[in-house]
Image: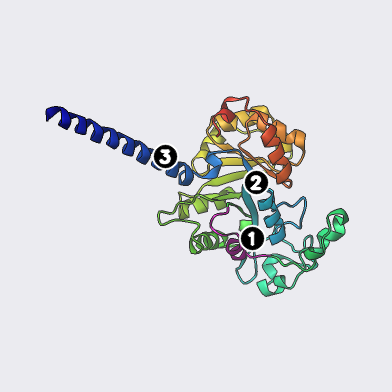
Amino acid sequence: MNRSMKKAGLSLLGAAIILQSISMGASAAHQKQSGSPIYEKKIVNIAHRGASGYAPEHTIPAYQMGERMNGDYIEIDLQMTKDGRLIAMHDERVDRTTDGTGLVKDLTLAAIKKLDAGTWFNQKYPQLAKKEYEGIVVPTLEEVFRKFGREANYYIETKSPEVYPGMEEKLLKALKDNKMIDSRGKTKNVLIQSFSKESLLKIHELNPKLPLVQLFSYKNPAAISEKELQSIKGYAVGVGPNFNMVDRAYVKMVRNQGLQFHPYTVNERADMKKALEWGATGVFTNYPDLFNKVLREHKPNNAFNKKKE
C-alpha cells in the first residue's frame, strides 16, 4: 500500500510539473505577444507619410500601401484646422499636396475636405499615377484610427505645435477616445515625435507613460553631447535625426545611452544598409518594401543589433 501511495504521489507530482510547464509557457507566450511595444523587440520599418514613394503622402491609399508592404508603423504628421480638428498633413499650407491654397490654421475642416489631395501626385509622378488617386481627401486623425483600428501601429508627429495651441491635449484625447491608451495611461502601438522639445515635455507632463521621440534637423554634420542625451532620456525613448548628417559615432553615442535611433528619411539601399550597420533600431522610409528586403539580407554585426529578436 505504501508503494502504491508513493507511485500515486509521484504521478501527481509529475502531472503538476507538466501543468506548471504548460502554464509557464503560455504565460511567456502571452508576455511576448502583449508585453513590450514593437520598437523594443525589433528593428522597425516606419512607412514615412505612408508608402509615400508610391502614393500621395498622408492619404488613406498611402497608409494602406504601407501596411501591404509590411511597414511596422503608419507615420502621421499632424496639423490643426481653424475649427480645431487634427488632420494628417506635413505642411502648414495646403498648397503642395492639394489643389487648394492657404494655411491649415485658417481653413475649416469642411473647407479642407473639399480639396483634392491626390491629383498633384499623378501630375508629378506620371509613372505612378492611378485614376483612383484623383479626388481623394485629406484624412483626419480620427478617420485614420477608424480605418486601421487598434491593431495598427502609429508614429504621430506634432508639427509646428507653437502654431496650434492645445494640439497636445487634442492628440491625447483622440488617443484615449480611440482606446489607444489603456486605463493606466500606457500604449503598446503609439509613438509620438516632435522637433519641439516643449511639445514633447508638455505631453510628458500630461502623460509621463507615453513613449516620445525627439526629432532633430541638422544643417551641418550632426553632433550631440552626453549631457543632451541624458536630458532627452528624462522624457523620451529615442531620437530621430536626418540621416544624411549623422555618422557612426553619433549613432553609437545614442545607443550607448539606451535610446532608440530612428533616422529619417532613408530611401536608398546603401543608406539603409549603413544605418543598420551603425546600429539604427528603425528607419523612416518612403519605400517600406525595399527596407524589408534590406532587413532580410542584414546580418547583425554589432552589440546593439544582436540584442534584437
Looking at the image, is mark 1 or mark 2 nearer the viewer? Answer: 2
Looking at the image, is mark 2 or mark 3 nearer the viewer? Answer: 3
Name the amino acid type tagged 2.
Ile
- Horizontal side, residue 288 vs residue 259: left or right: right
Residue 178 percent across, percent down from the top left: 51, 62
Q: How is the image coloured?
A: rainbow
Task: Kindly check if marks 1 and 2 are in contact, taking CB atoms under 8 A apart as contact.
Answer: no
Q: Which residue matches tag 3?
A: 28
Magenta residue check for 150: yes
Counting residues from the start of the chain, the first of labels 1 and 3 encountered is 3
Q: Which residue matches tag 1?
A: 163
Q: In which quarter of the view is residue 80 placed?
A: bottom right
Helix, strand or loop at mark 1: helix
Find the distance from the CA under tag 2 to the CA under tag 3: 27 Å
Relative vertical location of residue 157 with respect to residue 285 in this rendering, above or below: below
Residue 5 percent across, percent down from the top left: 15, 32
Q: Which residue matches tag 2?
A: 46
Q: Specify start and end residues of the magenta stretch as a single range.
A: 139-152
Relative vertical location of residue 258 with respect to residue 217 in this rendering, above or below: above
